[in-house]
Image (cartoon, rainbow, N blue to C red):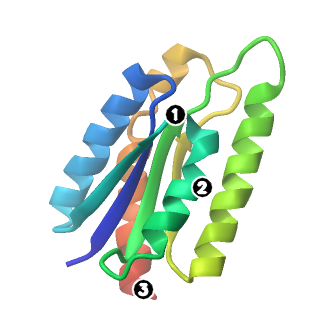
Amino acid sequence: MTRLGLVVAEFNRSVTERMEAAAREAAADADAAITDTVHVPGAYDSPLAADRLARRDDIDAVAVVGAIVTGDTDHDHVIASATADTLTDVSLERDTPVTFGVSGPGMSGAEARERVEKGAAAVESAVSLTQEL
């Protein structure tokens, strides 16, 4: 059984709570266990939590979910890029799969609500990587 850590961004909670539910359902469908869940303020805050989970011996992979919606500036692009880059670093430095179930940037709240399946996809990828590696 694959043991997962789950990081959930709270910003845009109306979306991320549905992403979290999709992630949990995908874990159950894959016969994986979510060993621990860490809620963080926003997607940008997820790398530290992912790193802490990836260090643990009782976690095989970490799935990160969040939603980054567009605003009046390009800030969403900066947040998404920094988050993706840093999560990749965590995965490589810890030799642990860390999957990116963060939707955005450049999308509206309505578009984010249409992409809640990213939560399930992050878990499915984490399980797949754990089995392959």
Eyeballing the image, is 90 above or below 18? Answer: below
Is residue 129 positioned above or below 63 on the image?
A: below
Q: Is residue 16 above or below residue 62?
A: above
Give the number of the disc on residue 47: 2
Q: Which comes before the other along the chain, label 1 or label 3?
A: 1
Residue bearing mark 3: 132
Q: Secondary structure at mark 2?
A: helix
| Residue 17, x across and y down, in percent | 33, 30
Q: Taking 87 as reference, is 131 left or right?
A: left
Left or right: residue 41 compared with residue 31 = right
Kind of residue at disc 1:
Pro
Which SS class for mark 3?
Answer: helix
Callout 3: few (<14), some (14-19), or many (20+) C-alpha neighbours within 10 Å? Answer: few
Quarter occupied by the N terminus: bottom left
Can you tell which of label 1 and label 3 is closer to the viewer?
Answer: 1
Do tag 2 and tag 1 residues touch (Cβ < 8 Å)? no
Q: Is residue 80 above or below residue 6?
A: above
Residue position marked by numbered label 1 in the rendering? 41
Residue 39, image quadrant: top left
Q: Marks 1/3: CA distance?
A: 32 Å
